[in-house]
Amino acid sequence: MSEGGHIPVVDPTGTDGISSLLWLVIALPLLGAAVLLLAGRATDKWGHWLGTLMSAGSFVVSLLLFVDLLGRDEGDRQVSQHLWEWFSVGGLEVGFDLLYDPLAALFLLLITGVGTLIHVYSIGYMEHDPRRRRFFAYLNLFVAAMLMLILSENYLGLFLGWEGVGLASYLLIGFWQHKPSAAAAAKKAFVMNRVGDMGLSLAIALMFVTFGTTSFSGVSAAASGASENTLTALGLLLLLGACGKSAQVPLQGWLLDAMEGPTPVSALIHAATMVTAGVYLIVRSNFIFELASTAQTVVVIVAVVTLLWGAIIGCAKDDIKKALAGSTMSQIGYMMLGAGLGAAGYAFAIFHLLTHGFFKANMFLGAGSVMHGMNDDVDMRRYGAVRHAMPVTFLTFAMGYLAIIGFPGFSGFWSKDKIIESALADSWLVGGLALLGAGITGFYMTRLMLLTFFTEKRWKDDVHPHESPAVMTVPLIVLAALSVLAGVLLLGDWITDFLAPVVGEVAHHDPPLPALAITALVTLVVAVGVAAAWFLVGKREVPITPPQDVSFATRAARNDLYGDAINEGLVIGPGRHAVHGVTLADRRAVDGVFTGTAAGIGALGTVLRRAQNGFVRSYALSLLGGVLLVLLALLAVNLV
């Protein structure tokens, strides 16, 4: 790390050999989307296979690029590819350039790898949907936009992918637009993300005004020369953008409603694409946040609030997908916390992002498998004992469950514990709240497991649970294996060393307790959460209809901690009144000036029109009157 805490971005070298194929990573899924959308119904019979093949091809290229990157020296692991000059306006010249480095490499493998598994799963899940071809086109578009976001060498290119992700999410969340709830959810996600997008667009404009460039390397090199106020403003604007995409407080309200889309969409949004974009933005912009301590502190505050917010919501949801959505909000909060801790947490934030991508995709697709066998019912109160009818789904889902709660040896145990350890070393308060979140995670995830796979069966008479076909269970098995084994990335500090050229060496701080003691403490807290769920849910009869005589805390959690009501009171309501006032002023004042002037001229015309009566004597009299007025005027001038 250089003077002032600034982490420089090494000037990337040009591409050659395998790295010259970098553009293909984006081009393949983009081509798939174009063919499926433009060719129309002619591709209905095989469009799903084409979409899956394009995503798989992108994964193969990403894998080849990763192997090539590993073969390079550490100082040569940042390469760029200039495709063409995008535009040039005044002093701003922007190329359509791609940047491939260790951070991008890990994201590419996650997006294309998990994305391809979701495509395969969707072949079975969407088999009977008449618009399946269009669904796969949107999936391809989603993957391509996310890849553009990750691979861009500058913030403007990132913004292009950023908006593409927003468009694709809107199309997929509202895919079943015949449902009013799905259409409303898509609109809500789109509008709330536009708020965050304003933050990112203003940050990009400020970068150009301050640094004269929007490239990562250019901003990184010049950041140390900017004022602290400018850097703080940049950091806060970038955080606003991240809050929108990653569903962090206060822009978290769209995430749970987004469950109205098909389940593979939920898996793609929560595991490999949209919600990870905000974390990427913060980590990629580390050279700004390292010089803006105030912005870094705000990132930590937002992260802690969100990780607890999402965890509490997850405790009271009976909709299996919404319970998992609350979980995602909380887990992204942990990643943002790692990013907010600076050099001590950047690498661990990405590590947890990767492990979370595996086990959350596993659980969302597992939830879809359960819904598939339960006639699309999402209410866990009408599940129970499903493990007997769906053994593969149960076992794979259990691997994701053990990973997310941080069971020793599973992937989440390694990644989340590292963030908590770094947080405790930074602040007892922050670390303690992160630890509390881990305990709540143990509670709500165990509650989900008990309501779904254990307790007594509470199915409807017409429901006959059954295992999903192999095209759906094979991706579950692969993701379950990754949920167990992804912790190996930490062996020998591999992931921290691999990411060091981008985020710097991990800053080690002395934690308040030995690492082994912290691990034992986290495990104990999680065990308490698991035990609480067992006594409060597992050992009690589960009513099919949720009881109404519940505490205020339970009602608040069921209502998403009144996030929508807060937004209505603080933003939407005042905004609506402000717009009404402006509209009223426009109608009565602005419009009044123009309509009043027009009315006056019209009245004058009416008066003058009466003089045009067609009688010669009237015109002669008018002429005589005019002559007299002229003579009188001349006389008056002469007298003066």
Image (tube, rainbow, N blue to C red):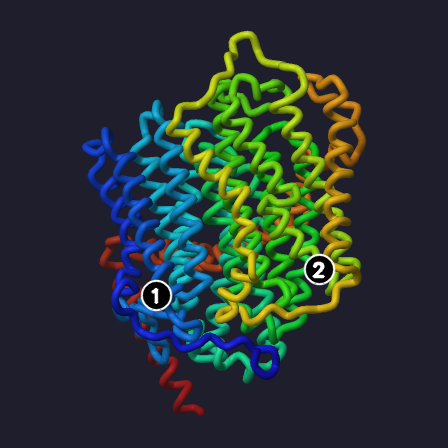
Question: Badge 2 local density, few (<14 within 10 Å), some, or many (20+)?
Answer: many
Residue pictured at 57% horizontal, 36% vertical: 399
Q: Is residue 544 left or right of residue 34?
A: right
SS state under label 1? strand
Residue 520 location (% of width, % of height)? 75, 49
Q: In the rendered view, tell whether residue 254 sits above or below residue 217.
A: above
Measured along the vertical axis of the image, is residue 522 above or below residue 552? below
| Disc marking residue 132 | none
Screen quadrant of the C terminus: bottom left
Q: Where is residue 245 shown, x and y percent of the image?
A: 52, 52
Q: Nearer the viewer, residue 152 or 453?
A: 453
Locate residue 542: give its quadrant: top right
Instruction: Please name whichever residue, 296 or 422, is drawn nearer the observer in this view of the structure.
Output: 422
Helix, strand or loop at label 2? It is helix
For residue 478, side relative to residue 491 (left or right): left
Query: Mark 1 = which residue?
Result: 98
In three-dimensional space, the C-alpha distance between marks 2 and 1, rounded to whole angstroms, equals 34 Å
Q: Which mark is residue 423?
A: 2
